[in-house]
Amino acid sequence: MPREASPERTPGPVRRRERTEENMERLLSAAADLMARQGYDKTSIRDVGREAGFSLAGMYYYFRSKEELLYRIQDRTFGLLLAQQERLAADGGTPEERFRRLVCSHLSYLSTHRDELKVCTFELESLKGEYYAKIEKLRRRYFKLMAQLVGDLLGASGRTGVDARDIRHSTLFVFGMLNWALMWFDPRRDSPTGELGEKMVGMVLDGLRG
Amino acid sequence: MPREASPERTPGPVRRRERTEENMERLLSAAADLMARQGYDKTSIRDVGREAGFSLAGMYYYFRSKEELLYRIQDRTFGLLLAQQERLAADGGTPEERFRRLVCSHLSYLSTHRDELKVCTFELESLKGEYYAKIEKLRRRYFKLMAQLVGDLLGASGRTGVDARDIRHSTLFVFGMLNWALMWFDPRRDSPTGELGEKMVGMVLDGLRG
DNA sequence: CACCAATTGGAACGAACGTTCGATATGTTA
DNA sequence: TAACATATCGAACGTTCGTTCCAATTGGTG
C-alpha cells in the first residue's frame, strides 16, 4: 500500500529532503543550546546527539567535524543578523533614527536567538583557519556598519576634534552594552526588548543625566 | 641557636617560604595568561607547567585541583579590585565624581591585570559549588556598589518614574562597556586608560550628542 | 518485488586530559 | 653529619573525547 495515497501532497523525495533539513535544524538548535549554556569545549558531540535524538556516529552524516558544526551555527546566525541590519541601515532617516532601528533590531534578534548569538559572540576563537576568517569577516562588516552610524552621530553633535579613535571607542562601548546583554537578558525578568532598546539608545544619545 | 641570628638578612626558612610564594605567583600568572588567551578548558595543566617551569605532577604541591587553581586566580584578582573600588566609592564627593573615579580605576586595573580579569569575567561558570558561590558573592557586591552610584546619578538627573529596573539596566549597560573592553583593549593601540575612562564617563553621563 | 541511495548506529581507536603514587632531591635544623 | 619536612618529578591510571569503520536499516524508484 502506498504511503501517500492522498492526491495533493508532495510525493516523495521532497519529503525525504525536508525531513533531513528538519534534522539538521534540530541538530544545530540542540548544539547551540548546549554550547550557549556550557561552552563549546564542555559540550561533547555525545551530548548533542543525546539532546537531538541521534546516535554518536549518526550525526557525522550531517557535519564533517565538531568545528564545522560550530561554524554552521555561527555562519547562519550571524549572517542572518548582518543581512537584517544592513537592510535596516540602508532604509534611510536621520542618524538617530537609523541608530535606534539598529539597536532595537539587534536586541530583538537577541531575544529570539539568544543561544545562537551567544555562541557567535563568545566562541569565535574556537574556530580556526578558514572558518575563523569567514566569521571574522562578517564581524568586521557589522562593526563598520555600526561605526559609520556612530561616526555620523558624533559628527552631528557639533563636537570638535572627533577622530577615528573616538568613533572606534564609542562603537565598542555600544557593542559592549549589546553583547553583554547576552549574559543577563531574561525575557521573563526584563522588559520587552522594545523598551530595553529605548533605554539603551537613550543612554548612548543623551546619557544618564540628559 | 636562635631563629633570627643575623639582624638584617632573613636567614633560612623565610627564604624558603619566599621562594615558594614566588613560585605560586609564577604559577597563577602563567595560568591566567594561558586561560585568558585560550580559555579554561583548552588550557591543560601540562601547558601551565611548561609555561611556569614545573613538571606536571610537581604543580600539585601548589593546588589540589585545576578548579582550585582557577578559583585562586579569581579570588585574588577580583578581591583586590573589589577592595580598591569599595575604598574609592567611600571616599566622598558628588555622585559624578565618585562614578568617574570608579570607572577610571576599573579601567586602570584592567590595563594592568588584563589576563586575570578576563579569567574572572569569562570563566566564573567554570567554577562549581562552593568555589562558584564565593566568587559570585564578590560579583554581587561589586554590582550593588555600582548600582547604588548609578541610582544616585539617575536620581540627580531630575527624571520622573525611575524604578529599580531602570537602575539595574543602566548598571548592566555600564558593566557591558567595562567588561567588553577586555575583548579589545590593547595598551599599544588604545589611548591611556585615563583618557578612555573620560570617554566612557562622558558617554554614560551625557551621551554622544551631549 | 528488487534495487539503490540516503541514513543510522554499535563498536572501537588513538589521543589528550586531570589526577595519583611512590621515589627522589633539596635545604634547614639539631 | 643525621634527621626531617619541604619540594619535585617520572610514570602510570582511568576517563572522556572526537573521529572512523562498517554493517544494518530505511524509504523511494523502476
Image: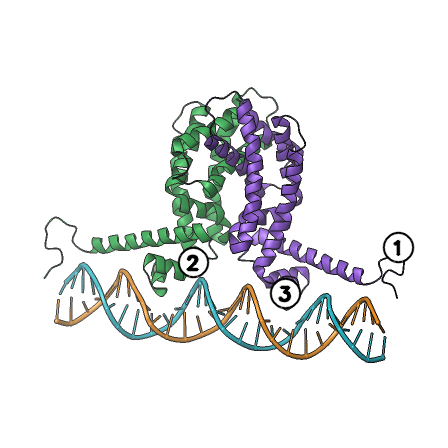
Chain colours: A green, B purple, C orange, D cyan
Which sits in the foreground, A111 or B92?
A: B92
User: In the rendered view, would you say A203 is above or below C7?
Assistant: above
The residue identified by callout 3 is B60
Secondary structure, mark 3, is helix
Secondary structure, mark 2, is helix
Q: Position of residue C23 (x, y in %)?
A: 68, 79
Which sits in the foreground, C9 or B116?
A: B116
Category of crowding for the residue at label 3, using alpha-carbon neighbours closer than 10 angstroms: few (below 14), some (14–19), many (at least 20): some
Quarter placement of the C terminus of chain B: top right
Q: Position of residue A58 (x, y in %)?
A: 33, 63
Category of crowding for the residue at label 1, using alpha-carbon neighbours closer than 10 angstroms: few (below 14), some (14–19), many (at least 20): few
Mark 1 is on which residue type? Glu
Q: Position of residue C28 (x, y in %)?
A: 81, 66
Q: CA distance from mark 3 to mark 2?
A: 32 Å
- Asked if labels 3 and 2 share a chain, the reply is no
Horizontal arrangement in the rendering, residue A69 relative to residue A205 (left or right): left
Category of crowding for the residue at label 2, using alpha-carbon neighbours closer than 10 angstroms: few (below 14), some (14–19), many (at least 20): some
Q: Chain of mark 3?
A: B
The residue identified by callout 1 is B8
The residue identified by callout 2 is A66
Which sits in the foreground, A1 or D12?
A: D12
Q: CA distance from mark 3 to mark 1?
A: 34 Å
